[in-house]
Image (cartoon, grey):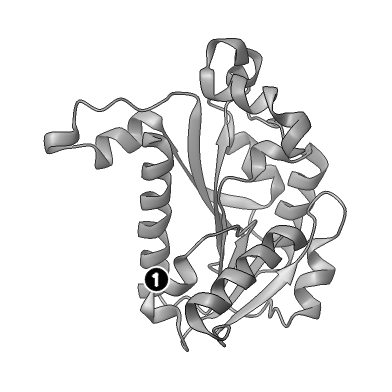
Amino acid sequence: MEFLVARARYMDDFLQIYIDDGLEQLVILGAGFDSRAYRFEKLKGQVKVFEVDHPATQQAKLEKLKIIFEQLPDHIVYVPVDFNEERLEKRLYESGYDKGLKTLFIWEGVTPYLTPEAIDDTLAFIAHNSSRGSAVIFDYVYTWLLQEASKHGEIKRMQRYRSLTGEGLTFGIEQGTIEAFMQPRGFYQVKNMDSQDLKSLYFTGVNQKRTIASGYAVVSAVVKPKGYN
């Protein structure tokens, strides 16, 4: 739970930095019940927002939003897509995505459940369809965590219930290799925040003794400008 809280806070802070720096477009990948488009006032009317998610999950969210707001917010475009079955490029452009705008892609709580091919396709889209200064931020797990699943209760439970949920942790990145992973895929200015980095940043004062699970990290990276080697 501590990692989930720190992850959300860190991504919120990262988003705020980009808003203050002139963000023009926000794409939330695997949006689920993400509430950023409703919590950040400066996104309303100022930034083009796309929420991308699996059709079934998105429909459940839309029904809740209609109850809360009576009508759907008009500053958000809802894009139903199955990352493992459909191409993000096609669905986003059909929905009005503009590759000429400075864009931030937030990808929270998604990558561990995808195939390597789906990961590469999504990062390739971002790298080749974003303007100068655009960036991505996402969380991931270290491969050793998947290999030692039996020693970690939360991972073991996820694997146990895979037959019911249709989801299981399948993708990880070797610890210490995130820059080597991101650079060939078209990104630079890679910044990695692991569990202990997040603990040092947020769990201070009365919360400094709280523990945070290891094996998880959040990475941010900027799309390489054309001609950058």
Locate residue 102, reporting x and y percent: 55, 75
Task: Identify the residue position indicated by label 1 in the image.
Answer: 39
Tell me if 72 is positioned left or right of 43 in this view. Answer: right
Which residue corresponds to the image point at 60% horizontal and 17% vertical from the top-left?
144
Q: As rendered, which of 53 and 14 lies closer to the eye? A: 53
Task: Tell me the element at label 1.
Answer: helix
Q: Is 119 located above or below residue 199 in the figure? A: below
Locate residue 207, reporting x and y percent: 19, 34
Q: Quadrant of the N terminus?
A: top left
Q: Quadrant of residue 53?
A: bottom right
Q: As rendered, which of 56 and 130 lies closer to the eye? A: 56
Say whether residue 95 is visible. yes
Tell me if 105 is positioned left or right of 195 in this view. Answer: right
Q: Is 150 located above or below residue 74 in the figure? A: above
Locate residue 25, reporting x and y percent: 56, 76
Q: Quadrant of residue 157?
A: top right
Q: Quadrant of residue 94?
A: bottom right
Which residue corresponds to the image point at 48% horizontal and 76% vertical from the top-left?
68
Which residue corresponds to the image point at 61% horizontal and 51% vertical from the top-left?
187
